[in-house]
Structures are given as structure tokens and as C-alpha cells.
Image (tube, rainbow, N blue to C red):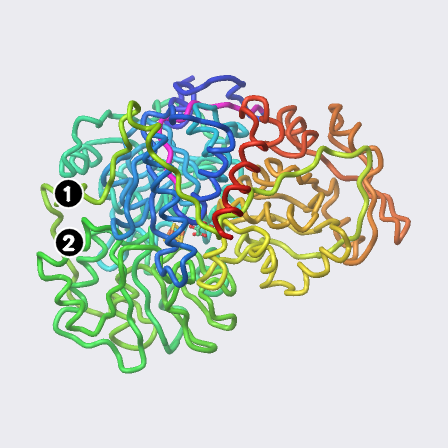
Amino acid sequence: MGYTLSQKIINAHLVSGEPVPGGQVALRIDQTLTQDATGTMAYLQLEAMGVKRVKTELSVAYIDHNTLQSGFMNADDHRFIQSVAKKRGVYFSRPGNGICHQVHLERFGAPGKTLLGSDSHTPTGGGIGMLAMGAGGLDVAVAMGGGAYTIPMPKMVRIELTGALRPYVSAKDVILEVLRRLSVKGGLGKVIEYAGEGVKTLSVPERATITNMGAELGATTSIFPSDEVTKAFLEAQGRGDVYVPLSADPDAVYDEEYVVDLSALEPLAAAPHMPDNVKKVSEFGKIKVDQVAIGSCTNSSLLDMRRVAKILKGRTVADSVSLVIAPGSKQVLETLALDGSLAAMIDAGARILESACGPCIGMGQSPCSAGVSLRTFNRNFLGRSGTADAGVYLVSPETAAVSALTGYLTDPRENGEPVVVDMPDSFLVNDNMVIPPAPESEADAVEIIYGPNIKDVPLGKALEDSVSGEVLLKVGDNITTDHIMPAGAKILPYRSNLPHMSNFCFEVCDPTFPERAKAAGGGFIVGGENYGQGSSREHAALAPLYLGVRAVIACSFARMHKANLINSGIIPLTFADPADLEKITQGDRLELAGIRDVISGEADSFELADVTTGEKITVRAELSRRDRDLILAGGRLNAEKNAMAGAREQLSAVSCQRIADSR
Ligand code: MIC
Ligand code: SF4
């Protein structure tokens, strides 16, 4: 029996574990990336672990999320990251150089390598045949220190692509179609491999759009083969030397298989407020549009931008529409400036934003009240745009550009003549915005600079014999990390200040949650299916930890959030019978009697007592031995404290220093 493409990469990086269904695999990580919103925490943790120099083949710190810099906080965080990067051996991609995933694909990614990023859209690298996964900052910090990354061995899904896309139908429509079929939880515990004749009709940026939004399927990662198209892309980036051909064996066995006929696809859109709420654009009727936003790590490549420019050229954006465009990288933006595309965009009335995440994470450009915003982004979760009652539709760049001109959600095929753009044989390469680390011999002299906004990483406490408390919040299915720990211009600046940030925990669901949690001295959260889907942000576990949450009981969990809860020492429990969710009401008092013994042992199912109703509910601890040990210790930072050379001493020394500095 042959191997799938991801099984081959997993086998080549296996440190320990059994790569069989139900097993866990610890993988050697070749490359890491961080972005600034998760990076400060990751580097604080790296410092806490006492890692003198990163041990990966390549680690890059990007600044792309918090680039508004309203107030000193973000600028301080960036200076901190830059100083750690220089000292510890990490390349530093300066603000303005672009969105981490776009830049990494262009300048650093390599087929067959493993990449771990503190951002859920790290699987963008699957577009060039990398096994690229998102993780919480602590897991990335451990990988930088040379530690393995452990995941449940994923199931294998093959999506065979046939045919070729027709004009005005785009890679975004491919992944929207996959989301329509599989849903936002359809990829849980799975790797999605693309294969078939249709693959070679797709360029690398198109493949990357598809693997990028595999995050919205909840997949561990998504991957394309590395072939002649990959080779040409890497050569055009001046990096042909990293090319290796890679594909699945013809007799590889998959757990699930699907076929997507590219030639049968039509332009699609995901309606508010979930990326799988997908219909054909032509089926939506006449929806008036207030804002169009083009960019994000999903759709900001040169290919996307040139298509947009061509559609806009010589025309004017509709009176009622605000069109914003953020090209994904300096390379893309500079090329557009030189080839006249930028002029065409500006001339049509587009507002050009810097190469960064920007509106995708609510950093500006929030739509008007009850506004309709068409976005080429990957997430349309409630409130993420910064306007609570706005409706965000996820669309392709072609649909976005044509609709910006008409003022209505428009099937781009109505634009007429197909849009044909060329891709360069060689991209404009200038890495002057990437600062290499100091040589190891000079690293001791580099000072790490902390700002007063940077506070301690909260630490969990060792698990007690029994845990009891109130159900502080009960929520439904598909709760995202944007619900749990929202981002946006108001909150994102406090990513290194958990005491302040936690005041906004669950703001979208119930703004009284933080106060109530503090008053109750902590307790439980109860949720439905796919709890914690979306981003990798460990803040969605650290803020509840700070507020005293001891366990989350849900019908099922998203992979990264479950790992972040475990890393924080919060117990993720599932209902043995999901119908039991109905038996618990917010405010009930729950008790996990003898939980320490349960977690110390092997039992995976036991009873939770609802003291208020007298019900006994069977819950499951679907946890490996390693997970259990982390929870017993009160989280990963605690568990690894020996290896971390006095983590807490260092953290408190650092914080004493910071308190002294801020006085
Ligand atoms: C996102 O798209 O939600 C983010 C912001 O990039 C997050 C990371 C974060 O919260 O900092 C992600 O996707 O992991
Ligand atoms: Fe940035 Fe948006 Fe991509 Fe997240 S999804 S990395 S916020 S562009």
C-alpha cells in the first residue's frame, strides 16, 4: 500500500508516535512563522523557556496584524519582537513587508518541509507542497526551541480536481464549493490533499488560496502536490533550488474521497456569518453593497491584484461603495506600482491600504451600521469586521471588483470579456525588509526591549482532586475564537496584556462574562459542536484561564483550540451523548469529583454532577497521556518548567524589571 503525500512528509519528520488512525504523532518542525498578534506571547514563552538560539532550519517573525499602531502598545510589541528575533536567531519581516502567509509562500516556503505557524492560515504553505500547520504561540515557541509538535494522526481526504476553471470563476470559488459540501467542521482531524488532472491548471497563488481556506474547514492542513507549476513559481522567485517533486503514491489509501469538476463551478459567495453558508452569486438576488474589501492572506497575490486592476481599469467605483484594496506583500505592491495596475486601481477610486491584514481582523475599515461588505477574505464571523450588525459576504476578487463597480453583489461573468493577465517569469525580488538575526557570536550583546504594555503570561495551577463551580456561560455550535476572544482595533493592542484583554472575553456573546467570572471565582463554560473553531490565538484559552475557567464541556472541539486549552491547563471535556447539552443550564453548579484521579488514570469517560439539578452526566476526556500530564501540571508552561530553566523565575525577573522600567 502506498502513501499519501502528507503521510510521506509525516513519516519523514516523525520523532515519536504511531502514524495510524487514533494515534498521536510528534513531528520535527523545519520552519516556524509567527505574526505580531500571537508573536509577542510566543516570544515571551520562548524567553521563559530559556531558549538561547532557535533550533529550526528557519524561523521568521512577521509584523502584519497590529499595524495601526494607535497608541504605543503595538509599536512596543514590534520593538520587543524585533529585539528577540535578532538575539535568538529569527528573521524579522518588518511592518510593510506584507502578510505572513503571502510573504512566506513567496520568499521562504519549501516543498516537503514542515512549517508551524502561530496563525491558523499557515496551511497557505500547502500551496507549494509543505505540511504547514497552525498552532498556539506556545507550541510554536517549543518548536523554535527544537521541540516536536504533537498532533492526532489526521485522517486522509483526497479531493480530485477535474477540468479547468472557466473565465471569472476563481480559486476562491473552489474552496467555497468545498466548504459548501463539507462545512466548517468537515475537515476536523483531517488533512485535505488535492490531486487529479485539474491540479496542473492551477497556479501556485490559486493553490494557496485553496489551502489557506482549508482552515475554515477545520482541517489540520491542506496540501497540493509539488510539480512543474511549483517549480516554475519557485524559479520565478529566484528559489528554484528548494524545489523537489512530491505527490501521493498512486495506490495511496484515503479515508474520504471527493471530486470537484472545476469546469462546472460558478462564482460563489459565503453569506453572513459563516464561511460555509455558501450559495451561487447568481442565486442571491440584488443585494446592495456598501463596502468592498480586497486583500487578506487568501486573495492578495499578484495574480488576484492584476485581475482586479484589469476589471477596474478606466471605470469608477459605484457612488455608494467604499472600495479598499490591500495587496498582500511588498513584492506584490511594488510590482503593481511598476506595471501600472496600482494607477488603474487608484484611478477607479480604490482606497489603497498597506500590505497587512487590516480590515480582515477588524483593524479599521469597519462597515457602516447594518452595512453589507463583500470581502475576499476567509472569515465572516459575526462582529469580526468591527461592526456588530454588518453582513460580510466572502467572495472572489473577480466578484468583489465587478460588484464594486455595479454597487450590487454581481455575478462577475456579467462583466463580459474574460480577464486575462500574465504572470512574470521572474518576480521582483528585494528582501530588504527582512532583517536577518545577529550572528550567534554577537547575540549576547543584543538587548531585549520590553514595553510597559507587556505583562506576564498567566500560569495555570496544578489540577486539584476535585473541581466544582458554576456554568458561567452556555453557548451553541461553531463558537469561534473571535467570539471567545475578539480581535479588532480596540482589543488587539492588548495581546501582551492579558489582565486588560480578558475584560473583553466573550464580548460578542455576553459582555457581562468577565465580571461574572471574576465574581464567581471562575467556573465552567458549556458549548456545542466545533467549539473554538477559527484562529490559532491562544488568547482564547489564556483569557478564560485568567478569569478562572477550569473546564470547557462541549459536544466537540476544534483542534487548535483544544490544544491551547490543554496547554493552559483548562480541561476540554466532551458530552458522551451530545443530547445531554440540553440538561445543563447557565448558572447550574457542576462538580467533577475525583477529577485528578480520572486524569491521572486512563479512563476516558466518567460522571459530571450537575449539583443544581441532581443530574449525572457522562462526559469524556478524549486526551492522550501527554495531554493528561499537561493538565495535571496546570498547563504546558508549568509542565515543562524543568526543561525551561526556571521559567517562572525568569518571567518574574522580567516582570520586576518591567515594573521598575514603567515607574
Ligand atoms: C485570524 O485570522 O483570526 C488571525 C488574527 O490571523 C488569527 C491569529 C490571531 O488571532 O492573532 C488566526 O487566524 O490564527
Ligand atoms: Fe491576517 Fe486575515 Fe490572514 Fe488572519 S486571516 S492572517 S487576519 S489576513
Check residue 245 in the rendering and tell me which mark sits there, or answer none: none
Instruction: Assign a secondary structure to mark 1.
Output: loop
Left or right: 426 as drawn, with respect to 328:
left
Task: Please tell me whether residue 31 belongs to the stretch shown in magenta.
Answer: yes
Left or right: 27 as drawn, with respect to 98:
right
In this view of the protein, can residue 268 be seen by the observer? no
Check residue 430 in the rendering and tell me which mark sits there, or answer none: 1
User: What's drawn in magenta, residue-wise?
Assistant: 23-34
Which amino acid does the dot numbered 2 rest on? Answer: Glu
Tell me where residue 146 appears, x and y as whole percent: 43, 23
- Name the residue: 18% across, 73% down: 348
Which amino acid does the dot numbered 1 rest on? Answer: Asn
Q: Earlier in the sequence, mark 1 or mark 2?
A: 2
Instruction: Assign a secondary structure to mark 2.
Output: helix
Tags 1 and 2 in contact by the CB under 8 Å rule?
yes
Left or right: 483 as drawn, with respect to 611:
left
Quadrant occupied by the N terminus: top left
Residue in the foreground of this view, choosing between 662 and 619: 662
Q: Is residue 181 above or below residue 258?
A: below
Mark 1 neighbour class, 10 Å CA radius: few under 14, some 14 to 19, many 20 or more: few
Label 2 lies in ligand 2 vicinity (Cβ under 8 Å): no
